[in-house]
Image (tube, rainbow, N blue to C red):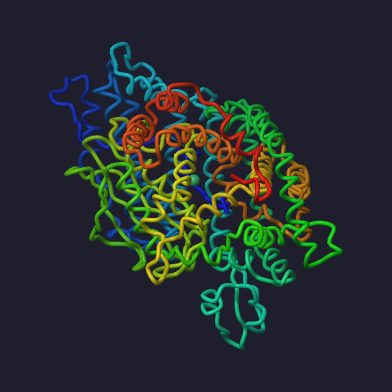
Amino acid sequence: MSTFRIYLVFLAVLLLTACERRQDAATRPQGESPAQAETTAANELIAVYRIPELSELQTGEAMAVACASEVANLKEWLGLLEGFEGIPTAENYLEPYNAVLVSATNMAYTAGTLAGVSPDEGVRKAADDCSQSLTSVFSDYSLSRPLYERVSQVELATADADTQRFVEKQLKAFHLSGVDKDDATRARIKALNEELTVVGQEFDNNIRDSVLYLELDSADQLAGLPQDYIDAHPPGEYGKIRISTQYPDLFPFMNYAKSDELRHQLSLLRNNLAYPQNQAVLEKLLALRFELAQLLGYENYAQWVTADKMVGSPQRVESFLEELKGYTTESQGREYAMLLARLRQDKPEASKVESWQAAYLEEKVKAEDYQVDSKEVREYFSYNHTRDGIFMLVQDLFNVQIKPWQTYTWDESVEAYELWDGDQLIGNFFLDMHPRSNKYQHAAQFPFRNGITGVQTPLAVLVCNFPSGDGLMEHGDVETFLHEFGHLMHTMLSGGHRWADIAGISTEWDFVEAPSQMLEEWVWDYDTLSQFAKNATGESIPKALLDRMVAARDFSLGLDTRRQLSLAAMSMGLYNQDPQGLDIKAFTDRVTREYTLFEPLEDGHFHAAFGHLNGYSAIYYTYQWSLAIAADMFTRFKQEGLRNVETAGEYRDLVLGQGGAKPAAELVHDFLGRDISFKSYADRLSAGGQPAADAH
Ligand SMILES: [Zn+2]
């Protein structure tokens, strides 16, 4: 399930290729000199501008008007910033520039988020159009020589560390965007950026709007599924039972349905979402990005996109994937053998395990060898209890308070909250947690705005697709919930910065999954679960059951990790070559065989709905890279206690609260008191697939 746990560093590529984040100028300097007149004008414009409230964006027309106004402002502000004469300083130049970054980022985030969650087709369309218009104007910024020159002239000798880092990040982004290319090349780069936005949206929207159904003739075909699932799927029109490819239908079916054939059919449907629509779209996406990278002076897109990441190059990614492959060779072999042995109990002639059998067999082995019955486990995780429990956890750990927030939401199922630290409002967030037509189908945190000191507090939304109310969640869903909450806390707690590209989740992209993946650990902690994991009669989850779950936790880690490595290798490989003439299906099948023990589905086209190929492009490895870092950071909690509020407080201050103030490796060093080590993760991977009796 972690495959689809997404954090969208929202339009990050767009923002990078464009310029950086934008900020408001509530911090307007007083008594400026005549030489600062141009900038003052920019400041005044920005000071009167405000992003419309969400309640004002309920129609496509309102969205279009708000966006057009922002785009017109951005064009005017660019002229003012480019025409600045005098000696640029942090106060007279960076401040208004930063204000522009914040303003534009707010609009870009809002448009991108509403495109994924608004129930109104007009709003979704206007939001997509808005992102396209913003791409165009962002290109004007990122490719502007006058702007680049003035930012690079800012005197930094006496500036504080945050200001120095802000300028350093800006200048690097200008170079990556192609500011130093000639006029004709910059014009083509701009055109490519615009086209890429349109093609990327088409790819995402085809996935968002694609749902396929398995039709069953009778309830007998639901054999093996939990009773609450059977009750929730009565026969509909013409007496047919419909099972959709959406997660709340899909995952339990793949885990529990007795019928091998029906699991195969549903798996085929899932692996043909957005196919064939996205085949040509993906080919175009790869071709355009390849051309862009070459124009920017890179061999291919993978080289370009890794240049500002922790890894620095595709070669480092490849060596990292190889390293993890080595740690999992033996464990995946042991695990596969256990699944095959279990399959042979039902089918003595079986010689291999198919992909659509794996989750079902894992459930069987867990139940029989480790005495973990997932159907029993889910009894303790109703949505409402889980949400309340996660609130309790983060309130305790980070010393914050969550309170209901009375405000407009775009759908009646969406919940709204305030986050407080004592008497200080830190930020606000929404929970949009249940499936709906035309809604983003995976799980992600989307920001509306980052927190900028004295200007604005953070606002974000968790978008998930869980059962609602007393509906029961899988333990894996609870893990996903916590994961996304990790991103949310990162956004909420990184709000105290002056500069746009320091506030919010603005570390290197391949670090952003580390805080969220580390928080997943708490879903295995009895002290945490016993507070909220209760069944319908109010009994807490038994300690003995959790102990058995912990023992079974890593039983399929080798197989699962190999699947993740295969996705990372696909994502990297598709962008680390000239895509002309590339047979995508043949390529992804080859990678699947290289990394996993399962045959790719002959008629499956997984790549058509592998949404990360747009948003993350080549860098899906981020999940494993961040996980290795998360395991390392977690060693301190393991030693000092998962509920140790002092450790959590230091983590909040030294890592989450820093935003992008330092390179991620330094943040981790500050917290651990030493350099990052992958040893903890390597040890865990190597130990996967131990027989039940030997499991810890
Ligand atoms: Zn994530």
Give the quadrant of the C terminus. top right
| Image location of residue 637, percent across then percent down | 42, 36
| Image location of residue 31, percent across then percent down | 13, 23
Image label count:
0
The foreground one among 605 and 189 is 605
Give the quadrant of the N terminus. bottom right
168 displayed left or right of 95: right
Direction left: furthest residue: 31
Q: Quadrant of residue 288?
A: top right
315 displayed left or right of 33: right
Q: Quadrant of residue 80?
A: top left
What residue do we see at 61% from left, 27% from top?
313
| Residue 33 position (above or below residue 507) | above
Residue 271 appears in the figure: yes
The foreground one among 261 and 64 is 261
What residue do we see at 25% from left, 49% from top?
401
| Image location of residue 274, percent across then percent down | 63, 60
The foreground one among 550 and 259 is 550
Residue 435 appears in the figure: no
| Residue 588 position (above or below residue 89) | below
159 displayed left or right of 352: left
The foreground one among 20 and 592 is 592
| Image location of residue 529, percent across then percent down | 41, 54
Direction top: furthest residue: 157
93 displayed left or right of 477: left
Direction bottom: furthest residue: 238
